[in-house]
Image (cartoon, grey):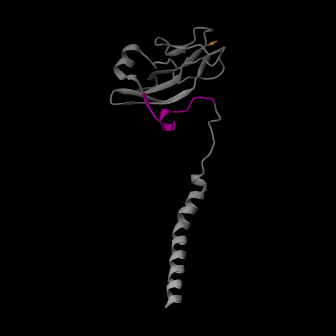
Amino acid sequence: MNLNRRKLLSWFGLGWLASLLPSSLIGCSEANTPTASAPTSTSAPESVAAAPSGNFKEIGTVAQLDKDGALVSSDKKIAVVRNPNDATKVLAVNATCTHKGCTVAWKSANKEFVCPCHDAKFAADGAVRQGPADKPLQRYAAKIENGQVLVSA
Ligand code: FES
């Protein structure tokens, strides 16, 4: 009788260990291994939809964007404009010039960002149009939701 109880308990112990095995293996799989990979390219992403999702914050309203031609975050670090190639979408960039760090301004007439310090020019997606800056403005994921312009920076 005592031996049967010991045997039974040992079987329960093995069963418990076996039940943990699949979740342990999943936890160690390559797919769940965190990576420290960062974007290696400094070029602007191809599309906003391809950008990773994150915590979006409200920069302003669509009405304000359409009235002013651009939205600038309260800290002046993020600028958002309508995508000239698809007006239903918005593009968000870091407004800090990649040359020496001045803040670029959106010029609606030419649909470009212009740096007031040394006259570098950038397309709406942040690509360099004219030096001396040789790197694009950093892009952020942006979207329109319920009349609000949201940016993940
Ligand atoms: Fe912008 Fe020099 S800081 S062009």
Residue that appears at 60% across and 51% down: 33
Instruction: Look at the image and say whether residue 35 sits in the magenta stretch.
Output: no
Report x, y in % for residue 88: 39, 28
Q: How many marks?
A: 0
Report x, y in % for residue 123: 54, 20
- Would residue 91 be found to the left or right of residue 61 on screen? right
| Residue nearest the observer in this picture, 63 or 129 | 63
Q: Which residues are magenta?
A: 42-57
Residue that appears at 46% across and 18% down: 74
Vertical arrangement, residue 91 with respect to residue 9, above or below? above
- Would residue 50 be found to the left or right of residue 89 on screen? right
Specify the principal SS of the magenta part. Answer: loop
Vertical arrangement, residue 1 with respect to residue 143, above or below? below
Vertical arrangement, residue 87 with respect to residue 37, above or below? above
Report x, y in % for residue 42: 63, 29
Instruction: Look at the image and say whether residue 52 sits in the magenta stretch.
Output: yes
On the rendering, which quadrant does ligand 1 occupy?
top right
